[in-house]
Image (cartoon, grey):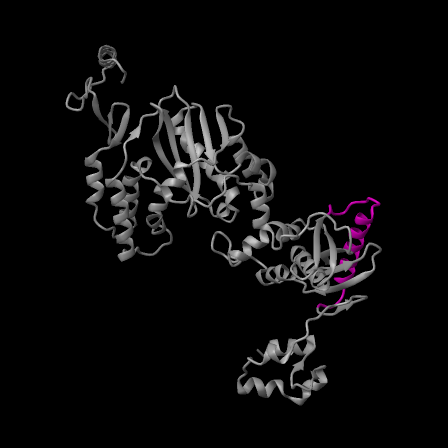
Amino acid sequence: MMGEKEKEVRQDSIRLLNWLGKLGVKVSKDKLQFVQRKVKYLGHLLEGGTRKLDPERVKGILELQPPKNKTDVRRMLGLLGYCRLWIDQFAKLVRFLNQKLVGDGEITWGQDDEQRWEEVKKTLIGAPVLALPNLQQPFHLYVTISSQTAVGVLAQKRGGRYQPVAYLSRTLEPVVRAWPTCIQVVAAAAELVVESRKLTFGGALIVHSPHQISTVLTGAASTWMTDGRLTHYETVLRTSPDITLGTDRNLNPAEFLIGERKEWEPDEHDCLGTIQLMAKVREDLSETPLTMGERWYIDGSSYVKEGKRKSGYAVVKEDGEVIESGALPANWSAQKSEIMALTRALELARGLEVTLWTDSRYAWGVVHTFGRTWRDRGFIKANGKQIEHMALLERLLDALTGPEKVAVVHIPAHTRGTTPEEAGNRWADLRAKEAAKGVPNEITIQQCTLRVPILTTADTENLTFTSQEIEYITREEWEKKDAVSWPNALRYWSSNTVSSLVTWS
């Protein structure tokens, strides 16, 4: 029971106590705080429209002994959880404790843990005084991200200045951490808005961020996230009439507190342009056909016939003329075959201007959206596991830099249209299925001009070999396997010879 006038609070409190008495409910006189300017409530001290942590609660946490097992860690996290609204970047500070709950083994507590725990205690000792929520005034939520954590400050304007109501933080999901920063902020804003609802109770909420959250949701988010996730974010951020999304390059308290704001940052931030730049392996990679150059169509195929799986790929022209096709190992999926088709097309187009059409949304997404992010992270998923087909994907991204100019265009699969693009895509599908009937590693190359870099002595003079390697690679029988010797004593071998080397290794 609270209010601004002492007389009214007294009368209302008496009515409440009398009503409880009629119901047979007893109230402890020792615990009763009757008409006081300063009260203790759930470990918080409320006074003059503000709230702060009870020193007794803080003292109890400071006196905790180092944990010996996971039960002790959970106890520490539970006690700290009551204080999270006062702790900036709470999720980041206690991450080392949460990590100790992962796995089945016993926990360890070392010097690094002790230092982090001391940092948590210092933060508790210096915990600020927060303003009590005023449901008659709009709330302002300032959002940013730091070290895989969504960080926010919920504030209200009082007396001409903003006062913090709560410090909010949430650890971003593994899948979100792999996104570009501008898209991560969308997830961060949605997470923190949900947390803010526990304090705003449906009051007007203005979300501030240097990123164009609404524009990203409309223009780029669908490429990076599932329909279900996108719908969730749109429901939280755009369908509620009491929420306003703002792009604000003024000093963001959330950035200021974590030290993220840089003086050299521009006033204008083009999120869509930044996302596109971060996703491209090469800046001039186009999604639309080039006006000049070669026009090739690619496809990969994997199907089961008479109980046996067959896989293959093809690179063709509009009229079905095969540039290259080949069978692939039977255990290759259609997705992997599509990647091989695109890779070989790019390798064949080295130094050329070329437009490549593919009906594989996955292959298209690798070169236009995900590939650079994966490579920058060492082809490791956000959950710490290695991405499938890593070697092939790395080869694809390397091949993407070969053509003079290149466009990779997506075209719907299995259409019956009469345009040159649709006809070319059907030819690629047919040739890939035909190629799958062959024997893996037997690749047919027709009418293809390759620009192969010439190796010189300078390229190989620093190579060293063991005596066993030298004995093997100088065998005369290799001459029969299509090896070629040059006057400079360097040797160049065919793919069959290289296969022998790999097998021997």
Q: How many marks?
A: 0
Q: In front: 319, or 313?
A: 319
309 lies left or right of 127: right
410 lies left or right of 184: right
Q: Quadrant of residue 434?
A: bottom right
Range drawn in magenta:
411-440
For the point 30% across and 50% down, which residue is it?
Answer: 70
For the point 28% across and 35% down, which residue is it?
Answer: 128
Q: In front: 180, or 353?
A: 353
Q: Quadrant of the N terminus?
A: top left
Residue 428 magenta-drawn?
yes
Q: Residue furthest front?
A: 264
179 lies left or right of 251: right
Q: Residue furthest left?
A: 30
Residue 345 placement (x, y as % from top left): 72, 60
Compared to 459, does 318 lie above or below?
Answer: above
Residue 477 visible within the image: yes
Compared to 340, does 504 lie above or below?
Answer: below
Q: In front: 204, or 427?
A: 204
Q: Quadrant of residue 171?
A: top left
Q: Quadrant of the C terminus?
A: bottom right
Residue 226 visible within the image: no
Residue 350 placement (x, y as % from top left): 71, 63
